[in-house]
Amino acid sequence: MDLLTQAALGAVVGEIVLSRKLGWRGAAWGLFFGVLPDLDVLALPFLDPEMGIRWHRGLSHSILIIFLAPTLLAKPLSRCRWALGSTTGQMWSLIFWAWSTHSLIDCLTTYGTQIFEPFSDQRVALNVLFIVDPLFTLPLLIGLFLALRQPSGSTRRKKAIWLLSSASILYLGFAFFMKSRAESQITLQVRNHLKEARVVQVSPAPFTTLLWRGLIETKDSYYLIYWSPFDQGKPQFQEILKHRELSRDFQNTKVLDALQWFSRGHWVARQGKDRKLIIIDLRLPEIRDPQNGVLQPIFQWHLSKDPSGHIVAPMRRPTQINYLPTMKILFDRIIGDSKKWDALKSF
């Protein structure tokens, strides 16, 4: 999830565990440990292309570290100036729950989290929430705002944090329910309209759990289909050719192997205007860009070789996008109007 959500979630944990003893400092400690696992990104500039692809949401998010970090840090931190009044056990609980909820909520997204490191590089991605979902985050922020305005240990403070946290938990339940409905509907549409195809993933569209994206695979192509509970018309499938033959110059290299691992094998290749190879991870959603009339892939790597033969593989994000019309057609698609949504050209 995004850093704001992780900070809010960690602060809520700190408020619940240590507010009676530490007041606002309980939330501050929770916020710190809620965002700490994501500071692994600070190492990215120093890593080679292959390790850079594999690094984020790796060991720092693992079950091993979730138990090891509080075991090593709880006792010394409970004695520091900013945690006086807490016990070792209470600090252990705060670190454990702030760290574990961070990894847990990351597992609910599509990116993938390596919770079994260093024993396995298998990534868990439940595809229930988009990495930014305001309806999950806002109740946490409101709950913190209301709680921190009340005296430590007061009934009103407890009620505020538990009531608004419960709203986020209920929203998660709604997300799981909508995912189940979306999987059923998308699977039915594929069975009725696409032969010899399989549904490889159903995941939420950006910022919502009311619109869901189905990724369908055939031998030479992928297809995208979107489903909303407000849909009424005939389903539309958007074809994306694989063109993996374009990657032949990079076959059996560590970088391409890492990208295949990262994408779980669901990638397509394109040739850029600069003749560089572009690898696109199709698990993660694209940006619908009505201003330019095209789909813009969010996760794409531009591969080339430097004069010494080493592979350079920077990740590129879409640029020069006007997000107002993008958000407008997203809202229209949620409520069932797919005309402009389906008219955009594939990449």
Image (tube, rainbow, N blue to C red):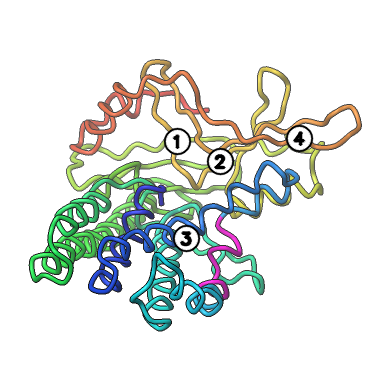
Q: Is 227 covered by the magenta stretch?
A: no
Image spot of residue 259 (x, y percent): 66, 47
Residue plotted at (32% across, 28% down): 341
Kindly indicate whether the residue at mark 4 contacts the one at mark 2 (C-beta within 8 angstroms).
no
Q: Which badge, 4 or 1, is on the more N-terminal residue?
A: 1
Question: What kind of secondary structure does the magenta stretch mostly adopt?
Answer: helix
Using the rendered view, name the quadrant where residue 68 is placed: bottom right
Residue plotted at (30% across, 72% down): 18
- Is residue 33 among the parts visible in the rendering? yes
Q: Is residue 321 left or right of residue 339?
A: right
Q: Kindly identify which numbered label has been placed on residue 312.
A: 4
Tell me the distance, in whole angstroms, between the alpha carbons under discs 1 and 2: 16 Å
Q: Kindly identify which numbered label has been placed on residue 286.
A: 1
Q: Kindly identify which numbered label has been placed on residue 221.
A: 2
Tell me the distance, in whole angstroms, between the alpha carbons under discs 2 and 4: 27 Å
Image spot of residue 49 (x, y percent): 73, 43
Amino acid tagged 2: Ser
Tell me the distance, in whole angstroms, between the alpha carbons under discs 2 and 3: 23 Å
